Image: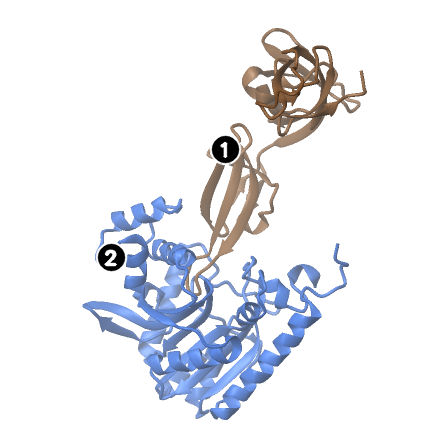
């Protein structure tokens, strides 16, 4: 297995920390004039998303994590797993369970192109497209002039996600949503 | 996007740097301290276990500081002198570290470490303007940050305090102290201060003396805006003690899996012949310039930083 020395640390490096795949966010070389050199590093756990800080001895090595990110098309959900297919020529398929799909499940619909992260060839996280177009399944009929909620109301989308929308939005409208913030961007012209 | 051929520093920063160098040389001329140039390549190098030297294909070393050569000059009758030039340390790369950097090192004959501290203040004020300069012993410095007396507490307390502050290695006393010291510097918000009377583990080539019932190294560091700017000693003059420390360093290097460094017998012989009583200090010139111009990383005051050469 490949290893990286602290001298090779660059943001974006994928390593194993306590057996878990992490991405190196930042590293700072610290050395007192006459003392031991350290590397203070911040890692993001790719499975849990949690940030870990560690102080390593400079020159220490860490095992590289076999992590790769691919664009994949979301195919279908069979009731307990979500199925994806690589968009390159390989057509290789992967199944991810609910824990792995996480937040993405409230945004994605069939044929959406997602970023799927694989560790040792198994999915560990799924990032939905930054923008998705989803139809409104349920929302109250808006009362014009009612600004108690700042002129907005909740709308439930076909995937189950809830977003705040302007009062004029009706059931069946197609919305454009930013999945990173969970916010309504506008009405979509696409179908 | 910066073109690959362009310098790392702005032209303005380089002009300010030139102005500072001129002031520094004038400072030493007024005090009768002579500029010398010793070789950048030597057949020996520093034994300090925490400093790695760059070894050339012919087996010689790029010097990590002019210390050994300057002391040989002093033993030969050279009066107070300084060197301002490049030094090299393998593997040191970061926002405030670069494998080649500029060191200003000087030795003042007959000075105590406290007299030399005043001279360092004078030089720094010349470059940065006046400001209050605090002074802490290493022991007090750690105590005010961690409420821990590092000279009296158990190894376990020391390790637990380090762990609570992000230390994740096993216990080695010198390393844990280095870690706590670095952390304390990061936490301290004072603009300029000295830390002195270091643990004997990091005495390097400083005299050891007794303070409050403990042996300490008569050594100081100046911290400016959170950066270590200067490191000075009341210089060790005993050749037997020098040889013992070099041996101790070699043993430690072996334990730490570092490359072996042969003893520099020319330095030992120079001390046998007699090094006059003196205090010496090394100043990280690039960092001092960086503080003066308000740079965020040291590379902003270098003509061409490592990734541009």
> Where does the C terminus of chain B fall, quadrant-wise?
bottom right
Q: Check disc 2: other Cα within 10 Å, few if <14, some if 14-19, many if 20+.
A: some
Check disc 1 and report the residue beneath it. Answer: A50
Chain of the residue displaying label 1: A
Q: Is residue B57 visible?
A: no
Q: Tag 2's secondary structure?
A: loop
> Where does the N terminus of chain B fall, quadrant-wise?
bottom right
Q: Check disc 1: other Cα within 10 Å, few if <14, some if 14-19, many if 20+.
A: few
Q: Position of residue B211 (x, y in %)?
A: 23, 71
Q: Nearer the viewer, residue A21 or B59?
A: A21
Chain painted brown? A
Q: Position of residue A118 (x, y in %)?
A: 62, 26
Q: Colour of chain B?
A: blue
Label disc, if present, on residue B149 of the rendered structure: 2
Mark 2 touches mark 1? (CB < 8 Å)? no
Q: Position of residue A23 (x, y in %)?
A: 57, 37
Q: Position of residue A51 (x, y in %)?
A: 50, 37
Q: Is residue B12 left or right of residue B28?
A: right
């Amino acid at each position: 297995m490949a290893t990286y020395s602290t001298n090779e640390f660059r943001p974006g490096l994928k390593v194993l920390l306590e057996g878990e795949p992490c991405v190196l966010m930042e590293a700072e070389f610290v050395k007192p004039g006459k003392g031991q050199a350290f590397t203070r590093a911040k890692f993001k756990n790719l499975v849990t998303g949690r940030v870990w800080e560690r102080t390593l001895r400079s020159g220490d090595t860490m095992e590289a994590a076999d992590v790769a990110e691919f664009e994949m098309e979301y195919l279908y959900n069979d009731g307990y797993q979500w199925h994806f297919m690589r968009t390159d020529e390989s057509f290789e398929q992967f199944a991810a369970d609910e824990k792995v799909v996480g937040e993405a499940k409230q945004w994605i619909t069939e044929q959406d192109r997602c970023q799927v992260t694989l560790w040792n060839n198994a999915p560990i996280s799924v990032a939905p497209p930054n923008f998705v177009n989803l139809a409104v399944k349920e929302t109250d009929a808006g009362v014009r002039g009612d600004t108690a909620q700042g002129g907005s109301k909740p709308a439930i989308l076909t995937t189950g996600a809830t977003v705040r929308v302007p009062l004029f939005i009706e059931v069946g409208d197609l919305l454009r949503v930013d999945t990173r913030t969970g916010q309504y961007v506008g009405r979509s012209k696409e179908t | 996007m910066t073109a690959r051929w362009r310098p790392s520093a702005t032209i303005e920063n380089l002009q300010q740097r030139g102005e500072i160098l001129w002031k520094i040389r004038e400072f030493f001329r007024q005090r009768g301290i002579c500029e010398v140039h010793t070789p950048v390549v030597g057949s020996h190098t520093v034994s300090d276990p925490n400093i790695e030297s760059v070894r050339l294909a012919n087996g010689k070393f790029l010097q990590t500081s002019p210390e050994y050569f300057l002391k040989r000059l002093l033993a030969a009758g050279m009066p107070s002198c300084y060197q301002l030039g490049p030094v090299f340390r393998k593997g040191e790369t970061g926002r405030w570290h670069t494998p080649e950097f500029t060191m200003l090192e000087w030795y003042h004959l007959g000075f105590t470490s406290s007299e030399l501290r005043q001279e360092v203040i004078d030089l720094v004020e010349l470059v940065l303007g006046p400001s209050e300069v605090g002074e802490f012993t290493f022991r007090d410095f750690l105590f005010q940050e961690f409420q821990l007396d590092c000279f009296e507490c158990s190894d376990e307390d020391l390790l637990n305090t380090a762990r609570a502050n992000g230390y994740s290695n096993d216990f080695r006393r010198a390393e844990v102290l280095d870690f706590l010291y670095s952390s304390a510097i990061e936490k301290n918000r004072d603009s300029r201060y000295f830390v002195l009377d270091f643990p004997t583990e990091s005495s390097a080539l400083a005299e050891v003396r007794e303070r409050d019932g403990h042996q300490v190294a008569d050594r100081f560091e100046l911290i400016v805006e959170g950066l270590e700017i200067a490191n000075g000693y009341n210089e060790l003059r005993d050749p037997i003690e020098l040889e013992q420390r070099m041996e101790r360093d070699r043993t430690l290097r072996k334990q730490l899996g570092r490359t072996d460094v042969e003893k520099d017998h020319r330095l030992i012989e120079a001390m046998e012949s007699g090094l006059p009583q003196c205090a010496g200090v090394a100043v990280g010139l690039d960092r001092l310039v960086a503080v003066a111009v308000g740079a965020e990383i040291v590379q902003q005051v270098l003509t061409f930083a490592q990734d541009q050469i």
